[in-house]
Image (tube, rainbow, N blue to C red):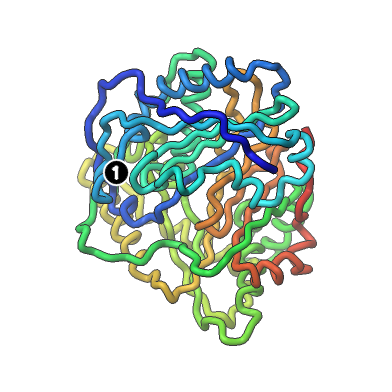
Amino acid sequence: MKLEFVSKEIIKPTSPNHPQTLSLSFFDQFLPSTYVSAIFFYDEQANQEDIIVQRLKSSLSQTLSLFYPLAGQIKDGVTVHCHDQGALFTEARADIFLSDFLRNPSDADLVHEFIVSPDHADPETWPLLHVKVIFFKDRGFAVAVSVSHKICDAASLSTFVCSWTNASKGYADTVNPEFPGPDFYPPADISLEFPPLLVRKTKCKTKRFVFGSLVIEKLKNRASSGNLVPQVTRIESITALLLRCMTKAGHSKAGKVTEFAITQTMNLRTRVSSSFLPHKAIGNFFFLPLLKESSESKMEIEETVSKLQKTKEELNQLIRNDPDDAKSSVEAKERIASAMLSSLHEVSPETETYAVSSWCRMSFYEADFGWGKPVWVAPGSVDKTQVVLMDAKDREGVEAWVTLPETDMVEFERDDELLVYATLSPSVLI
């Protein structure tokens, strides 16, 4: 596949009436300098490229008035200057048919062609938001949205896209985003040093594995077959299987580390009241528990699910507060921040970390700009995080985008235990 770049334009907010600065929270400061990205594919057949582009640009400008930090610029790694520097909007054409691409969309190298080119964007400074619209030969098109991880997590990206699609269809926006990051995770002393989170130094490969709804039920039954976990979710069971197979692949060779860590990101918004943290809060509001394991551990699925469930119970204890007592809420936020700092301190460059992030049950498949819902949605943020879980097109199955060192991926993708439940490289049917 080749992309022909047609145009680039800076899109600025329609209204300058907003705060001029936003401090990054301590968690924002130490997140890797990368983009959180998603690509939305549409099978629109109308020959209206100019109309599509113009509507996307004008509605993006409106949306940036609400999400004003995304049109700003980060200075000194601690503050967003919200002076309407704008977002980057790129238009391109692909030399293939969308239908051909979707026959085998599991090659992450091809999917990444739709994401920001590093020589044109810097997620740590500017642009903090880059949109790329790609038209296929059969008039299908894709919208790739990339937001700096210093400003947004996956839930924030989903909220932004929801607001943008509403504006594109001419609806009054009811999102009313808030940016409470500095209050929730107060900025840290910049003299503190933490190693970059989840950064791989070796050459990696990303591949897509699909879990159908029927095999997910079998996997859940396996994970809950004993007495440890009588109830298990599809995400817990898939996460435990992937971690088991990933660690087997990574530790199958002599000379590997004797200790490693596993983690599963937890969205705080869905676990607390809106008075504690607004459900439409924009920022990095997830909790990152860290579990240390020995390389001799067999990572039995039932035991791993039990440990993951225990971390959720521990988080529930941390966030427990009286919504009518301001002091209680402050203390709960301090407990969460302290626990996050402890986890960060435990991560060192020598610590091999296996991370899973779930984007399931978010509203990505509702992203209708006025030409119908997407026929497929793919994450573009799998180069730093090792696993991103997405809803499959039928909303019942799960797609797992797995990133591993190339030598580990060779072992992982032929793991018989994995292939009992997961399918590699199935097509996406329109």
Name the residue located 52 percent from the left edge and 81 percent from the top edge.
Answer: 257
Image side of residue 123 versus residue 391, left or right: left
The answer to whether residue 343 is visible is no
**Mark 1 residue type:** Ile
Counting every numbered tag in the picture gives 1
Q: Position of residue 398 (x, y in %)?
A: 68, 47
Name the residue located 73 percent from the left edge and 20 percent from the top edge.
Answer: 45
Residue in front for this viewpoint, 237 or 133? 133
Taking 401 as reference, is 90 above or below it?
above
Q: Classify 10 Å Cα crowding around label 1: few (below 14), some (14-19), many (20 and above).
A: many
Q: Which residue is mark 1?
A: 74
Image side of residue 414 versus residue 114, left or right: right
Name the residue located 79 percent from the left edge and 42 percent from the top edge.
Answer: 103
Residue 205, image quadrant: bottom right
Name the residue located 38 percent from the left edge and 55 percent from the top edge.
Answer: 31
Taking 384 as reference, is 155 above or below it?
above
Q: Secondary structure at mark 1?
A: strand
Q: Position of residue 251 (x, y in %)?
A: 61, 78
Q: Quadrant of the C terminus?
A: top right
Residue 282, image quadrant: top left
Q: Quadrant of the N terminus?
A: top right
Image side of residue 85 versus residue 417, left or right: left
Q: Position of residue 225 (x, y in %)?
A: 71, 64
Q: Residue furthest bottom?
A: 254
The answer to whether residue 350 is visible is yes
Taking 200 as reference, is 60 above or below it?
above
Q: Position of residue 256 (x, y in %)?
A: 56, 82
